Image: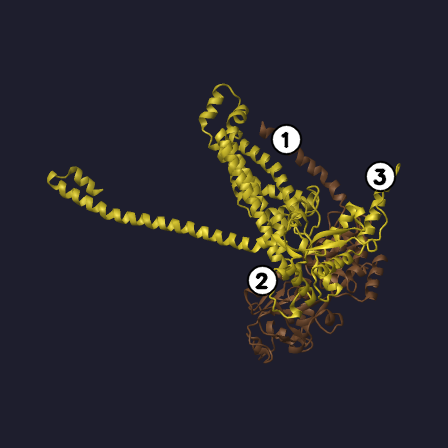
């Protein structure tokens, strides 16, 4: 008897679930966000504060997955089962805009939330590094000019560098950080070492023996550093600032990365952070406009705001105002 | 063999000699056999000891890392609900004849006004009043004072006002959580010798915490909020497991409701009713294979079927539960079939012999005997599903959710995924401990479930 009645309940439950499914998908009441793990801490803080500040909206759900992963989900189509906002630590690519368009997403509104520095950090117990893009290139590039031996120690590259094995943990290509790392460090370094007009494909080829690509988040990079203290890791400035007790940051072209030097543009390796809003969902999923307004308010992304405390480098007021204006005017990057 | 043959047929004169030879041989081999036995016993004991040592190291490591997280530092201080700071109109009262929607809109407006109040001013005043009470005279700027208290305290104060607006203008003695950085400092997780620029808190904030710890205003309290709060990134010190717990609870409910009845029903059919032919053989082989499929494959399947085809919501415990059901089903089927097979055929024959139908035989006589086995298998299957992480990552359950799910269709985290998320939090100093605390909670639940299985089995077996 037991099995008979329970299986009847189970069948009813299963049938009910399948019938209920489309109705549920239509009536999502909270924002769904995914993407860059660099933006994730900022977006989560805003999401949480948003939920507290607007009692009429549910707290948005923020997932990770990297800039590329987030934008892929974003471009999956229109409808409540797709995400509303994609976080990205790099601008959207033309190929992604095309993929979006193919799935019916044409109203893609870009919000630039502020800036983040990319820092090179090693174990706090290790030596100090004063890096230049060309040093980094020489250390890990697969292609060096003829007659230049591949170095094994940092001191092989330049006598000013410490005598330490070259081991680097860099973000894998699913991270937006990787692109900035290549553009702001590897390519300039390549041009300095290999000559001005070297093909970027040649420049971008990295050694396999001393480079580890990290597909996870920065804690994974941190774990590498703990396991092999010779490792030099690539981190976001905001992550470094939370872990200053275990990490020692390297200077780049003589500039120490900090909120001030990145904001002023002195520190060369920095990038803007973004999120992309699906215009088609505005008015369908409640709270999108309010979320964007709240995100770009002084309280959150302004000077002295909540996100500056968390390590985001605020954009000037005029720039934030312009971003908001473009959003309200419905300016889409797809046009 | 040859010796034995010889003694059986050999001459009596040789008998004594043969006996002696045999005895010597047995003695020789006895020593060898004893040695082999001792060796094996030692090896077995060694393995058990090694396994125990590993378990002890594991548990010792988890407990020593995670237990401190259950006690967090709090600041006991007077908070004055200053009406000048909390400058809001009276809480709306429902007028006679006012519609539900109107009242709710008015209430929302009032709550929004409260959300805009600068609660930090009350918190800073609270730190200052604790300092004045204890005679701490360190100069501290507002920002440093604010950095001592967890920012989640803002919402604690706000909720107190929402619950009882008459509190405005009064002073209450409260225990406020220290911020994550403050807790790290008080627990001495960072070396105190690090220079200022490598510390997370400013020097005055650190000095004030030290002074207040000395006078007893800052002290450890049991962190109940780990069980009652949801995850938080904005105020990490108050992050808790409530959302993840409810998410896991709903998933286990779905698994129990689907995997057990479907698994038991298919096992009964296959074992008792199905003809033995090539088709059922094939099914049997496939069920055994399914049980060995890595769980991440079920996650991929779930993402493809439940989310892309049925359009069920991402990160919902319902989808998680369905995926885990797929994973648990083969386990339940196999375990139920083996307990059915263990029922002696005499029981079946006796039932059939006195005229019971096959269904009556199964449900009245065979199934009751197998309850202990089925229950144990179900509970162990659920326990296994409770700890599963990989498939959940693929259906979006690794999102940051700051809500307690009200239904299985709301987005939610799950306990094992919460461990994964906390492990990846950028505030390593604080969340390392918290990660282990979450592991302790998950392990405690597992042990509880397993204990329940053992207790139920012994109880039911005694009855049967």
Model colouring: by chain
Closer mark to the observer between disc 3 and disc 1: 3
Residue B387 against residue B133 in the figure, above or below: above
Name the tint of chain A in the rendering.
Answer: brown
Residue A149 against residue B65 in the figure, above or below: below
Q: Which residue is mark 1?
A: A8
Chain identifier for the yellow-coloured part of the image:
B
Residue A45 against residue B4 in the figure, above or below: below
Image quarter where the C terminus of chain A lies is bottom right
- Which subunit holds the residue at mark 2? A
Residue A247 visible to an observer of this rendering:
yes
Q: Quadrant of residue A173?
A: bottom right
- Per the image, label 3 sits on a secondary structure element best described as helix
Mark 3, Cα crowd under 10 Å, few <14 / some 14-19 / many 20+, is few
Residue A304 against residue B415 in the figure, above or below: below
Q: Which residue is mark 2?
A: A223
Marking on residue B100: 3
Q: Is residue A301 left or right of residue B421?
A: right
N-terminal of the two: label 2 or label 1?
1
Q: Quadrant of residue B219?
A: bottom right
Closer mark to the observer between disc 2 and disc 1: 2
- Spatial CA distance of label 2 from label 1 is 50 Å
């Amino acid at each position: 008897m037991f099995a008979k009645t329970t299986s009847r309940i189970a069948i009813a439950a299963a049938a009910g679930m399948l019938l209920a499914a489309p109705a549920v998908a239509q009536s999502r009441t909270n924002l769904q966000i995914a993407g860059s793990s660099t933006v994730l801490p900022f977006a989560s803080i805003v999401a949480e504060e948003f939920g507290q500040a607007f009692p009429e909206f549910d707290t948005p759900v923020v997932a990770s997955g990297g800039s590329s992963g987030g934008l892929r989900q974003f471009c999956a189509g229109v409808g409540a089962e797709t995400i509303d906002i994609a976080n990205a630590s790099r601008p959207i690519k033309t190929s992604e805009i095309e993929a979006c368009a193919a799935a019916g997403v044409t109203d893609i509104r870009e919000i630039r939330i502020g800036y983040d520095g990319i820092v090179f950090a090693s174990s706090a117990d290790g030596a100090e590094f004063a890096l230049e893009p060309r040093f980094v290139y020489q250390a890990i590039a697969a292609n060096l000019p003829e007659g230049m031996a591949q170095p094994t120690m940092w001191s092989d590259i330049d006598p000013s560098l410490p005598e330490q094995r070259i081991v680097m943990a860099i973000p894998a290509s699913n991270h937006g950080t990787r692109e900035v790392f290549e553009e702001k460090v590897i390519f300039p370094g390549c041009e300095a070492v290999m000559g001005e007009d070297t093909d970027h494909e040649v420049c971008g080829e990295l050694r396999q023996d001393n480079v580890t690509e990290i597909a996870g988040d920065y804690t994974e990079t941190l774990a590498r550093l703990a396991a092999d203290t010779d490792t030099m890791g690539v981190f976001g400035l905001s992550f470094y600032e939370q872990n200053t007790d275990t990490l020692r940051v390297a200077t780049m072209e003589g500039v120490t990365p900090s909120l001030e030097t990145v904001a002023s543009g002195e520190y060369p390796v920095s990038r803007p952070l973004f999120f992309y809003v699906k215009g088609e969902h505005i008015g369908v999923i409640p709270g999108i406009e309010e979320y964007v307004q709240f995100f770009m308010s002084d309280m959150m992304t302004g000077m002295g705001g909540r996100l500056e405390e968390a390590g985001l480098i605020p954009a000037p007021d005029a720039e934030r105002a312009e971003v908001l204006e473009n959003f309200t005017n419905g300016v889409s990057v797809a046009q | 063999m040859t010796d034995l043959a010889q003694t059986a047929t050999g001459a009596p004169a040789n008998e004594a000699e043969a006996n002696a030879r045999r005895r010597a041989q047995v003695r020789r081999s006895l020593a060898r056999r004893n040695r082999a036995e001792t060796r094996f016993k030692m090896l077995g004991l060694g393995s058990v000891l090694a396994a125990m040592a590993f378990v002890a190291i594991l548990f010792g490591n988890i407990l020593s890392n995670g237990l401190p997280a259950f006690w967090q530092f709090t600041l006991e201080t007077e908070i004055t609900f200053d009406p000048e700071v909390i400058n809001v109109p009276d809480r709306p009262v429902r007028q006679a004849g006012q519609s539900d929607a109107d009242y709710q809109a008015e209430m929302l407006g009032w709550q929004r006004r409260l959300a805009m109040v600068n609660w930090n001013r009350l918190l800073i005043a609270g730190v200052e009043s604790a300092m004045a009470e204890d005679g701490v005279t360190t100069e501290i700027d507002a920002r440093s004072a604010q950095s001592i208290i967890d920012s989640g305290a803002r919402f604690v104060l706000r909720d107190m006002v929402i619950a009882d607006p008459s509190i405005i203008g009064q002073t209450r003695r409260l225990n406020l959580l220290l911020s994550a950085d403050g807790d790290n400092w008080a627990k001495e997780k960072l070396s105190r010798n690090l220079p200022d620029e490598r510390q997370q808190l400013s020097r005055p904030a650190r000095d004030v915490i030290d002074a207040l710890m000395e006078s007893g205003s800052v002290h450890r309290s049991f962190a109940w909020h780990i069980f009652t709060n949801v995850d938080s990134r904005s105020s990490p010190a108050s992050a808790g497991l409530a959302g993840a717990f409810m998410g896991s609870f709903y998933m286990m409910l779905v698994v129990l409701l689907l995997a057990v009845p479907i698994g038991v029903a298919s096992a009964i059919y296959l074992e008792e009713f199905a003809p033995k032919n090539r088709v059922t053989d094939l099914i049997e082989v496939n069920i055994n294979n399914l049980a060995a499929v890595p769980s991440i494959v079920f996650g991929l399947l779930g993402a493809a079927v439940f989310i892309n085809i049925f359009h069920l919501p991402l990160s919902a415990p319902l989808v998680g539960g369905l995926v885990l059901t797929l994973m648990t089903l083969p386990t339940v089927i196999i375990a139920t079939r083996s307990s059915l097979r263990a029922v002696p055929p005499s029981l079946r024959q006796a039932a059939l012999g006195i005229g019971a139908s096959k269904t009556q035989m199964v449900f009245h006589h065979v199934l009751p005997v197998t309850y202990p086995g089925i229950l144990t298998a179900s509970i162990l299957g659920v326990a296994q599903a409770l700890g599963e992480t990989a498939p959940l990552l693929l259906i979006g359950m690794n999102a940051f959710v700051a809500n307690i799910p009200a239904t299985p269709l709301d987005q939610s985290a799950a306990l094992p995924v919460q461990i994964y998320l906390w492990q990846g939090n950028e505030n390593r100093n604080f969340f390392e401990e918290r990660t282990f605390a979450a592991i302790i909670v998950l392990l405690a639940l597992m042990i509880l479930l397993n204990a329940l299985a053992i207790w139920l089995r012994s109880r039911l077996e005694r009855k049967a």
